[in-house]
Image (spheres, helix red, strand yellow):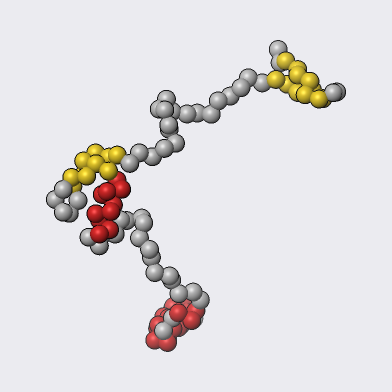
Amino acid sequence: MPELVEVAPGRWRIKRAEQRAARSDLPMPMVISDTMDPVEQVDGKFYTSKSAFRAVGRSLGLVEVGNEKLPAKPKGQGSMTPAAKAGRREALQRAFQKVLP
């Protein structure tokens, strides 16, 4: 049977069993480790530290996929060249002529 608890004068709540958040048995489950299995970088050496592996890659001019800086994309219709606009317009006209009698 649920137990009632007075939380303030005249205010009652049902006492529920405490629910703990799902957590790992590891001592610090929310910390990402810097260690990794030995991996060879292009310089022929093996690295067990993620930060050292990335530092060597950056110094050699390599780009880690997912962390690269992408160029900004142009916005709006002003980004199309006049030739591209004309080609698009002609393609649309041909499509309409095929569909409409």
- In front: 98, or 86? 86
Judge whether residue 9 can be spotted in this image. yes
Q: Position of residue 37 (x, y in %)?
A: 24, 39
* 87 is higher (above) or lower (below) than 73: below
Judge whether residue 97 can be spotted in this image. no
Q: Position of residue 11 (x, y in %)?
A: 82, 25
Q: Position of residue 13 (x, y in %)?
A: 75, 23
* Residue at image point 39% right, 69% down: 71
Looking at the image, residue 36 sits to the left or right of residue 101; the answer is left
Looking at the image, residue 85 sits to the left or right of residue 16; the answer is left
Image quarter for residue 70?
bottom left
Q: Position of residue 3 (x, y in %)?
A: 72, 15
* Residue at image point 31% right, 48% down: 51
- In front: 44, or 75? 44
Which image quarter holds the N terminus? top right
* Residue at image point 30% right, 56% down: 64
Q: Name the residue at the right extreme.
A: 10
* 38 is higher (above) or lower (below) than 27: below
* Residue at image point 85% right, 23% down: 10
- In front: 88, or 75? 75
Q: Name the residue at the top extreme.
A: 1
Image quarter for residue 62?
bottom left
- In front: 16, or 35? 35
Looking at the image, residue 11 sits to the left or right of residue 67; the answer is right
Q: How many marks?
A: 0
